[in-house]
Image (spheres, grey):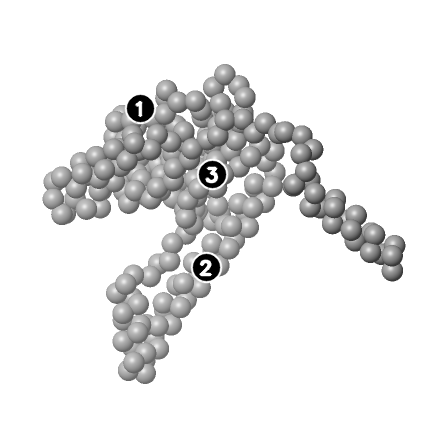
Amino acid sequence: PFVALAAVILLGAALWLPGFLPWGQSNPGPGIKVVTWNVQRLGELQRHVGPGAERDALDCVSKTLEREKPDVLTLLEVSRRRLAALEKRLDLTCEQTDYFGTQQVNHGGLAVCVPRTGAWELAISRPLELPPDWHYVFAELRRKGGGGALNILAVHFVPYRVSARDLRSGAAGLLRGRTGSAGRVRRNISDAVGTQGVHADQLIRTITSFQDPTIVAGD
């Protein structure tokens, strides 16, 4: 019993004491500020509200980012066309793809950006595929002048193909004893969850092959 107790104490010391005892000072280097934002197409889908929708959205996002001053920015729900306006406004370097990899300038997608005058640069960046037809952005960032590297993935998982109207219709049908609409909602959600799981598994397997620190940003 004494030997077993001693073994447990030694094992506990090996697992926990390194977190509390000053074995040495590590040097993690300067920090990095990352902002991720679903910008909802920067007003592109609200143009029916008025001619100033895109301008107002661009002003709001630009002023916020100018105040926050991120080292790295990942954007969701942004088209190539609207990203170009933000790049020009904030002097950014970006890698962008639409979700389906079509390269259509008006299609929503993802982007990883860094300020041109900032401390970090996009050393390698490209869209990658999540089969069968979904895409995300991979970027390897390097600190200018040396001293650090990291990976960042801008990811937006496949959304549920269910609208508020679908949910209302399904609920109303159930109250009347009809399951058709609710069944379609359930199938759509189930399909999306299954695809999200497959994509999450692939992302995890991709990340485990990296050697540098990795940030996954998105939703």
Question: What quarter of the picture does the N terminus occupy?
Answer: bottom right
Does dot 3 land on a helix, a strand or a loop?
A: strand
Does dot 1 land on a helix, a strand or a loop?
A: loop
The percent coordinates of residue 174 (x first, y second) are: 32, 78
Does dot 2 land on a helix, a strand or a loop?
A: helix
The percent coordinates of residue 86 (x first, y second) are: 27, 31
Q: Which residue is mark 1?
A: 91
In the image, 29: left or right of 79? right
**Closer to us: 33 or 182:** 33
The percent coordinates of residue 219 (x first, y second) are: 41, 48
State whether residue 21 is above or below residue 190.
above
Tell me the CA gap for discs 3 and 1. Answer: 21 Å
Q: Which residue is mark 3?
A: 153
Q: Amino acid at mark 2?
A: Val
State whether residue 196 is above or below residue 82.
below
The residue drawn where x is 53% and y is 45% is 203
In the image, 48: left or right of 70? left
Earlier sequence position, callout 3 versus callout 1: 1
The percent coordinates of residue 20 (x first, y second) are: 65, 41
In the image, 158: left or right of 201? left
Q: Amino acid at mark 1?
A: Asp
Q: Which residue is mark 2?
A: 193
Tell me the CA gap for discs 2 and 1. Answer: 38 Å
User: Viewer-nearest of labels 2 and 1?
Assistant: 1
Q: Amino acid at mark 3?
A: Leu
Instruction: Look at the image and tell me whether residue 23 can be seen.
Output: yes
In the image, 50: left or right of 164? left
Q: Which mark is residue 53?
A: none
State whether residue 112 is above or below residue 14.
above
Find the residue positioned furthest to the bottom.
177
The residue drawn where x is 28% and y is 63% is 164
